[in-house]
Amino acid sequence: MDALDRQIIAALRANGRATYADLGRKVGLSASAVHERVGKLESSGVIVGYHAVVDPSSVGLGVTALIGIHPTDIADDNEVAVALGELIEVESCYRVAGDESFIVKVRVATVDDLERSLGRLRRIPGVARTRTTVVLSTRFEGRPNTGDEDDDVT
C-alpha cells in the first residue's frame, strides 16, 4: 500500500459514496486507475465494506453506554466474546489490557433497556462483574484516521 492508496482510503472514509471519478480528481489518477486500486484494496481485505452512518437517536437508540467486563478467574475470553456478539445491543466489543477483559459499546432506547442489558451481560458465563459509563453526549465518533497526517485529502 502506497501514499496514493492511503489517500484513496482517506477519501472513501470521508465519503464512501464518492465516485471513482471524484476520487481520481482528489488523488490525481484516472477513474479507471482508482477503480483498479479500490478493487485491490477490497480483495486484499484492506477495505472490508461500506455502510450507512445513521444517527442512533433517529432510530430510537438514545442511550449509549460503555461497559467494562471483569472476568471470572476461569473465564474463557473466546466464549465470552461469542456470547457478547449474540446481544443485539452490543455495537462494538474491544479486548483490552487491565482489570477488565472487554469494553463493549451498547446502544439502547432507554435507561430501563440498559438495565435489562446489564442483567443479560452479567449472566454470561465468565463475567464476574461490569462497570458502566453512560455517555452524556458524543462529540465525534467513527472519525476517519488512516494513520498518516500527511495524507489529508480534504
Image: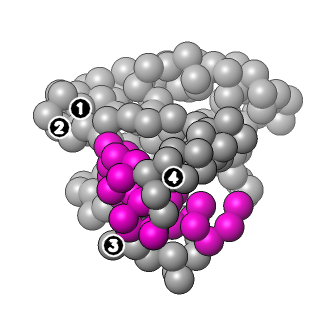
Q: Is 122 drawn above or below residue 104 in the view shown?
A: above
Name the kind of residue labelled 2 in the image: Ser
Q: Give the number of the mark in front: 1 or 4.
A: 4
**What's the amino acid at mark 1?**
Leu
User: Which quarter of the rendered picture does the C terminus lie within?
Assistant: bottom left
Looking at the rendered structure, the secondary structure element under dot 2 is helix
Q: Is residue 90 visible?
A: yes
Question: Do callouts 1 and 2 mark residues in contact (Cβ within 8 Å)?
Answer: yes
Name the residue located 29 percent from the left edge and 24 percent from the top edge.
Answer: 113
Query: In terms of secondary structure, where does tag 3 sit?
Result: loop
Residue 41 vs residue 32: left or right? right
Mark 1 → mark 3, Cα distance in angstroms? 31 Å
Q: Residues within 10 Å of mark 4 (few under 14, many from 20)?
A: many
The disc label shown at residue 34, or none: 4
Answer left or right for 72 relative to 66: right
Label 3 and label 2: CA atoms lie apart by 28 Å
Closer to the chain start, of discs 4 and 3, is: 4
Q: Are marks 3 and 2 in contact (CB under 8 Å)?
A: no
Residue labelled with disc 2: 57
Dot 1 surroundings within 10 Å: few (below 14), some, or many (20 or more)?
some
Alpha-carbon distance for marks 1 and 4? 37 Å
- Please tell me which residue lies in front, 16 or 110: 16
Residue at 68% across / 28% down in the picture?
Answer: 81
Q: Are marks 4 and 2 in contact (CB under 8 Å)?
A: no
Q: Amino acid at mark 3?
A: Thr
Marked residue nearer the N-terminal end (1 or 3): 1
4 vs 3, front mark: 4
Distance (Cα) linking label 4 and label 2: 36 Å
Residue for badge 1: 61
Residue at the spot of label 3 = 154
Q: Please report the bounds of the magenta region as a residue range.
A: 1-28
